[in-house]
Each structure stands twice: as structure tokens, then as C-alpha cells.
Image (cartoon, rainbow, N blue to C red):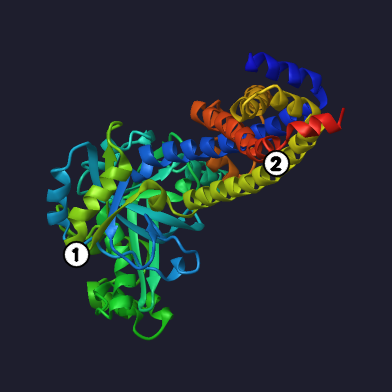
Amino acid sequence: MVFFLALRNLARNKKNSAIITLLIAIICFVFFIGNSIIERSNLGLHKAFISSLTGDVALQKKSDVSMNLFGANAPVIDPFFVIPVFPAYDAVMEIINSENGITGITSQVSGKAFLDFLGIREPVLLCGVDTRTYFDMFPGIILEDGRFLHNSEYGAMITMDRALKIERRTGIFPEIGDLLLLTSGGDYGFKIREVPLVGIFSYENPGLFMNEIVIIDPQTVRVLNSIQIASSNNITVDDDLLFFNNDIDDLFNMETFDSQSGAEGGFSADFLQSWLFENKADDDFDLAGGDWNFVLISLDNNTSPGKFINSLNKKLEPYDVIAVDWRVSVGQSAILLLFIQILFNAGMFLVCIAGVVTIINILLIYVFRRTREIGTLRAIGSSDFYIASLVFLENFILSVTAGIAGIIAGSIFINWLNSLSLEISNELVASLLGGSVLTLEFIPHIALFSFLLAVLFGIIASVYPIYITLRIEPMEAVRQG
């Protein structure tokens, strides 16, 4: 009885009903589309990094500065930040190996350097990996040419994007076996290392900055990093830098090189290449433990990363090690997306407040126009609960209708947008959305949240008008004839 009476009242007041329904539907539509875009970006980033670079959980040394796999998350600090060495490696690995829900474990040492190749010099991110476990853990790394790095060998792999960029600028496509020259500098000089190109790869879902990565043997990264470690800890610089004592011109001083190597023919390109390879013998590192920056962990689908991290951090407390999720490991791009999501929903909250106030005003006008009807109902003995139920049901019907309309409109908009196949030229936006073509998905839980928001929106807007309705006395109906 109450339901049909509510429908009749809505039909008799089509204008107010249409305005309220349209307002709630628009808010539902905007919330649905906005969060669908953000969630699509989240899924894209998650897929790109989890299967190719970060895993689900990363273990790192505790630090006052939040850091990702290649430096500090604070842009101002990052150029001066040195990633600390992972402490108590063997003890921590014993703890990790005893945990359940893990599908993969690998280690990484990170660095930054300049890559010189065919006259092109550009900065790169160095990813020194434990080749025994790294490529098995990250199926998102696709081999395009050559082979994957082998254990205990010197070598590097570059992305196909970098190889094509080199070809565009020089007309020469890098070939397997070509030598890559890497340099890194610090307060006391710089390191030079030359390693062969053993493979060219691509990421299944490349995210922002991922094409800047060079996958390389960990020994080379440690040597290139030693300058920064020495300058920050006042460690004596090794023999590789002795020829930089007074002047940069000493780099090409034949007597300096002759005194160290006994070369008879003076300095030459062939001599420098020979010297670079000979000095590799001094780079003796233990691959089984220590001298890593991170331990990366992949989890099975049934294990919650959040619960796993909380549980693991309690066990790692004595070792000065902390576990973080993939978003912290990625750094600025993933954190930026989270910040955008927070800002968007904060803005939607303000919009909802304004919408509630608007709907309350419309409903109050509607209630005052129905003073005679409501007073008559009270005069014939209708209870407060009956009258409140009538007003509430009317607004509930409008909210449900608006929520359904908003979701349907959002779905139509998503299909229409996908049909346009819009190209994304901005690299940052493309990486956030997981591709160079704009595509959105219908995400069920976002649709459900949007619908519930519309219903909640209508319920909240009903509270004050119901209160005013219950204060109408039967005498009001008599006064209005």
C-alpha cells in the first residue's frame, strides 16, 4: 500500500522527481567514470610492475627516507641519496624461506650510470640481478634477441625501446656482442666499466621509466656504485682511480698507464679496452649473500600482501629491515596515482555535500507543498512511522533509479570511448593507463560502490525532510482548507 502510494506521489510531482533523479545520476556517473579510470590505471601499474620489476613485496634496509628500487621517493633528495646495502642478508633469507604463500624470491642491487654506445651518451638505471632466480620470477620480461644473462658472467641487457631509439639516432641497430661503456662518478673520481650486450628484451606491460632500465650483472653495479659508497663513507678509493690524482688530463697520460700495466705502445683505444677487461678480475664478490640492496618477493593469489607485510615486519624488526609493497618500490608514479585518487574522491565528497544540500532544499519545498495531504493523513490516524516510511520510500525509489541510470550511462560512455581507439601521446598518461591506446573497463566493484553511493546519497538527503514532515500537525490541513 505504501509503495503504490509513493509511486503515485512521484508521478504527480514529475518535475521535482526528475530534478532529484538527474542530480543523483550525474554524481553517480562522475564517480563511476572517475574511479574506473583511476582503478584502470592502478590495475595497469600493478600488472606492469608486479610481473616485471617489483614483485608483490620488497625488503630493504630501514631508512629515514622512503625509497624505491632506484633511489629516494622524494625528488629533492633523490640526486644525493645512496641506497644502503641490505643488512643481515643470510639471516633474513632464512626467515623469508620459512614463510608460506611465497612463489618467488630474488635479490637486486641497483645503481645509476651513463651509457655510452655509438656516440650516444645517456643516463640509465642499472638493475643488477641474481640471474638464478630473477627471470623465473618475472614472466613479464620478454626476450626479443640474444639470451638472458647467465649466472656469474659479465654482461648487460637493454630494452627494445632503447635499441630502436639508438637505431633512429645512429642508423645502426645494436647487435649481440657489442660492448657497452658504463661510467659513474662521485666526489673522488669516476668508474668506467665495459660489458658485452648479451640480450635485448621488452616488458609485457612497460610502465613509466621501465625502458630506462639496463639489466646487468650485479658485480658491475657494485663496482660502479663503489665511488658513491667511498665518497659518503670516507673509504680509500681503489687502484682504478689512482690516475686521477691531480688533473683530469692524467686520464690520457701514457706514463700513468705504462707504470701500472707495462704497456709499451702508450695509450690507445685498444689498450683502454684491454685494461677495462683485465681489471674485472679484481671485482670479486660473493653472489650467495650480502652486497645486495633489495630482496623481492612474489606471492600467490591467495595471500594478502598487506597481511603478509605486517606479519613479516614483526619478524624483521631486530634486523633493521623493512618490507614494503609494490607501490613504494615503484616510487613517484605509483604514489602520484594514489594521490590523484585521494584528491578525486575528496573532491567528490565536496560535490556530494553540495548535492545533498540541494536535494534537501528541493524536498523541503515539496514537503511544504504537501502540508495539506500530510496533515490529512495525520488527522485520520496515520502514525509517524507510516508517514516517515512514505517520504523515505519516495526518496529511496528516486535514489535507486538514479543509481541504475548512472551506471548504465557510465557503461555506455565506456563502450563509446573504447570504440574511438584514442591514441595517448603523453608517456606519463600512457604508462598510467597501461597502454598507448585509451581503453577503459567495466569494473564491477566500482559500479557497485557507485550505486551504493547514489542510494546512500538519497537516504542522507531524506533525513531532515522527514523530520520536518513529522512536525506537521493536523490543524495545518484545516487552515489550508
Residue 75 in view = yes
Q: How many callouts does the rendering have? A: 2
Question: Residue 345 or 269: which is nearer the viewer?
Answer: 345
The residue wearing badge 2 is: 355
Q: Which numbered circle lies on residue 460?
A: none
Q: Is residue 97 above or below residue 422?
A: below
Q: Position of residue 87 (x, y in %)?
A: 20, 62
Q: Quadrant of the N terminus?
A: top right
Q: Residue 20: which quarter of the image? A: top right
**Residue extending furthest toward the bottom:** 246
Sequence-first disc among 1 and 2: 1
The residue wearing badge 1 is: 282
Q: Is residue 427 left or right of residue 281?
A: right
Q: Is residue 370 left or right of residue 320?
A: right
Q: Quadrant of the C terminus?
A: top right
Q: Is residue 5 above or below residue 238?
A: above
Q: Which residue type does callout 1 highlight?
A: Asp
Q: Position of residue 363 (x, y in %)?
A: 74, 35
Q: Is residue 301 left or right of residue 340?
A: left
Question: Residue 101 or 234: which is nearer the viewer?
Answer: 101
Secondary structure of the residue carrying tag 2 is: helix
Q: Which residue type does callout 2 highlight?
A: Gly
Residue 178 in view = no
Categorize mark 1 by other alpha carbons within 10 Å: few (<14), some (14-19), many (20+): few
